[in-house]
Image (cartoon, rainbow, N blue to C red):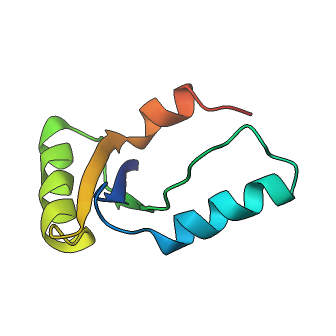
Amino acid sequence: MGRVVVEVMPKPEILDPQGKAVVGALPRLGFTQFTGARQGKRFELEVDGEVTPEVLEAARQAAETLLSNPIIEDVVRVADASEESAGAVA
């Protein structure tokens, strides 16, 4: 079974109140090195079999038509999840 990861973020010009709340809380918790935060959405789509270029294209189309609101959000990544786990930070 394969899995595709889709990440969606608010467009840069769109206000992000959740990201603003996070960036305000970080220094209060001792994380002073961060100066900004944006909150987005992550979807994991499972497929039978391997993740092929055709599957990635279908996921990209689904992301643009269903998983995101193209007026206020950008689809920033559509990728094979197995590639992601190869570079994961523990």
Question: On the image, which quarter does residue 32 sit in?
Answer: top right
The vertical placement of 23 against 16, above or below, is: above
Residue at point 23%, 69% (across, down): 72
Q: Position of residue 33 (x, y in %)?
A: 73, 37
Residue at point 28%, 41% (across, down): 51
Q: Nearer the viewer, residue 17 or 44?
A: 17
The vertical placement of 83 against 37, above or below, is: above
Q: Nearer the viewer, residue 47 or 13?
A: 13
Say which quadrant the C terminus sits in.
top right
Q: Position of residue 41 (x, y in %)?
A: 43, 64
Relative horizontal placement of residue 4, taking residue 56 as reference (left or right): right
Residue at point 21%, 72% (across, down): 69
Q: Nearer the viewer, residue 52 or 20?
A: 20
Of all residues, the one furthest to the top in this rendering is 87
Residue at point 54%, 63% (across, down): 19
Q: Position of residue 60 (x, y in %)?
A: 17, 52
